[in-house]
Amino acid sequence: LDLLDVTIPGLTTKYIVDIKTMNDKEFDEGPSDRTFQKWEAQVNLYMDWTGNHSAFILAVRKGGTKNSNGRPQHDLEEFTIQYKPELIAEIYSRWAQAQRYI
């Protein structure tokens, strides 16, 4: 969890923001299904722990692409993460099962 209770001008909702870096290929093509699933699980836990059910990923391009002045290009893109209580319940269930074997 990188930022908590972020407000966006003109909106009243407060957001959780998690910042992720992406290489050029993934940034240009979008996150793979597996990457998005990981983000979704991680951020849903943050939402459950904080009680804030509005969140998004702020993805930052961190590849080798250079902008017009030769400096690294750091594009940004937002990905909304929906609150999914059923996903959270599944994660906690798996943790409980793993704990039984430890």
Image (cartoon, rainbow, N blue to C red):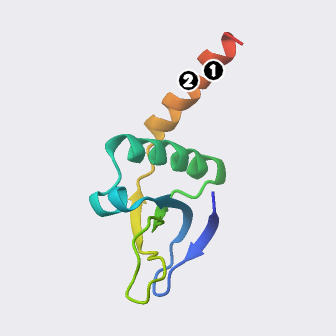
| Disc marking residue 96 | 1
| Disc marking residue 18 | none
Q: Identify the residue at horizontal 35%, vertical 52% (top origin).
A: 31
12 and 78: which is toward the camera = 78
Rounded to the nearest angstrom, the CA distance separating label 2 from label 1 is 5 Å
Residue 67: x and y in percent read: 39, 82
Residue 49: x and y in percent read: 65, 48
Q: Identify the residue at horizontal 50%, vertical 80% (top origin).
A: 8
76 and 85: which is toward the camera = 76
* Whether label 2 touches label 1, CB < 8 Å: yes
Q: Amino acid at mark 2?
A: Ser
Is 102 situated left or right of 5 in this image?
A: right
The residue that disc 2 covers is 93
* Helix, strand or loop status at disc 2: helix
Is 102 situated left or right of 62 in this image?
A: right
5 up-or-down from 54: above or below: below
Q: Which quarter of the rendered picture does the N terminus lie within?
A: bottom right
Residue 5: x and y in percent read: 62, 69
Residue 57: x and y in percent read: 47, 61
Query: Quick one: which residue is furthest to the bottom in this view?
Result: 69
47 and 75: which is toward the camera = 75
Q: Amino acid at mark 1?
A: Ala
Q: Which quarter of the rendered picture does the C terminus lie within?
A: top right
32 up-or-down from 8: above or below: above
* Helix, strand or loop status at disc 1: helix
